[in-house]
Image: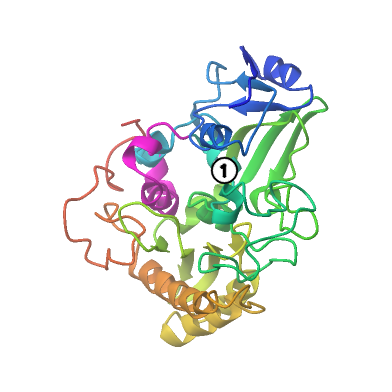
Amino acid sequence: MKRFDYTRAGSVSEAVAAAAGPGAAYLAAGTNLLDLMKGGLATPARLVDITRIPGLSAIEALPDGGTRVGALVRNSDLAHDIGFARAYPAVAEALLAGASAQLRNAATTGGNLMQRTRCPYFYDPASACNKREAGAGCAAIGGATRLHAVLGFSDACIAVQPSDLCVPLAALDAVVEIAGAGGHRAVPLTEFHRLPGDAPERDTVLEPGELIVAVSLPPEAAGFAAHARYLKVRERTSYAFALVSAAAMLALDGGRIREARIALGGVALKPWRARGAEALLAGREPGEAAFREAAEAALEGAAPSGEATGFKIELARRVVARAFRLALAGSPERVPALPGSAFAGSAFAGSPSPISRNAGASAHA
């Protein structure tokens, strides 16, 4: 591992000032960053520890009815906050579908947004990768591509973004709050991650030295609480990244769909919001025919990025349709025993999670 300087910041302004120099990186739990450093894939000259900054570990109800989640809120704390899980059940389900319990106890909200792709060519220093080194080429193209993109990819990169949390956040119009030397700014989550284009080395719109301080959900996001699900298809249910995932949400009125939300994971280098599919469902009676049409619309423009990737297009269509069927049936009273899994079914047999949508006031587990 390359030698680096270490500093601990006591405030957001201290952190931003400490990260102003070239080669600085922020350290929270380090569940992805430290692995990258050990493998020589990330070589920061300075780590700025932000774990002691006050105010970044709070889950706050906003005056307008929205919710603000600090960048240092642990994934497990957020998933097990009863008030949050009741208002945003698909987010809680996505959090519990990600990683292992040990990692969820350490990983943070901000870090989840910043995690790098799990493309095996990115992690292999012997393979050409434009994300590691601009202009190096992409060894994944023409290689083993089962896990790669079917939407939004380019000739420079066919990797996908691995986050579970980001998928329902994208569907709910979450906003990323950012602090930097020039002050604070807010970026919609759907615009926070970048598609590869000809510059795949840039994962996000963050400028050097900028720090994620929170993610906020607008007041209307809680309006989908009764009919919201996250569905994740993966090769190992216990612990694996998504082949394809979908967050599906419905707001019903008089037996019709007043508004629908759908976002996909595992298909592109950012959470893929399918606004065309949402528009198609507005005003429709919910049912299999409508959901299948929405699934076709959600994958409009999809194409294989390699010989082994084509199956993901049909898989994604089926995941979208099934996610909407589950959402129509209603958000579970308790998060299913296999959260986010295609094997959870609709009855949620097995040991229930301690998260109950009918429990009392918001609390941390």
Identity of the residue furthest to the front in this view: 126
Q: Amino acid at mark 1?
A: Gln
- Where does the image place residue 10, in percent across and percent down from the top left? 61, 12
Q: Is residue 35 above or below residue 18?
A: below
Residue 233 appears in which quarter of the rendering? bottom left
Name the foreground residue: 120 vs 20: 120
Identity of the residue furthest to the left in this view: 350
Confirm whether residue 198 shows in the render. yes
Q: Is residue 67 above or below residue 282?
A: above
Q: Which residues are magenta?
A: 84-107
Image quadrant where one finds the C terminus? top left
Is residue 318 inside the magenta stretch?
no
Question: Residue at coordinates 74% horizontally, 61% vertically from top-left?
Answer: 156
- Where does the image place residue 18, in percent across and percent down from the top left? 72, 17
Name the foreground residue: 309 vs 78: 309
Residue under numbered circle 1: 115
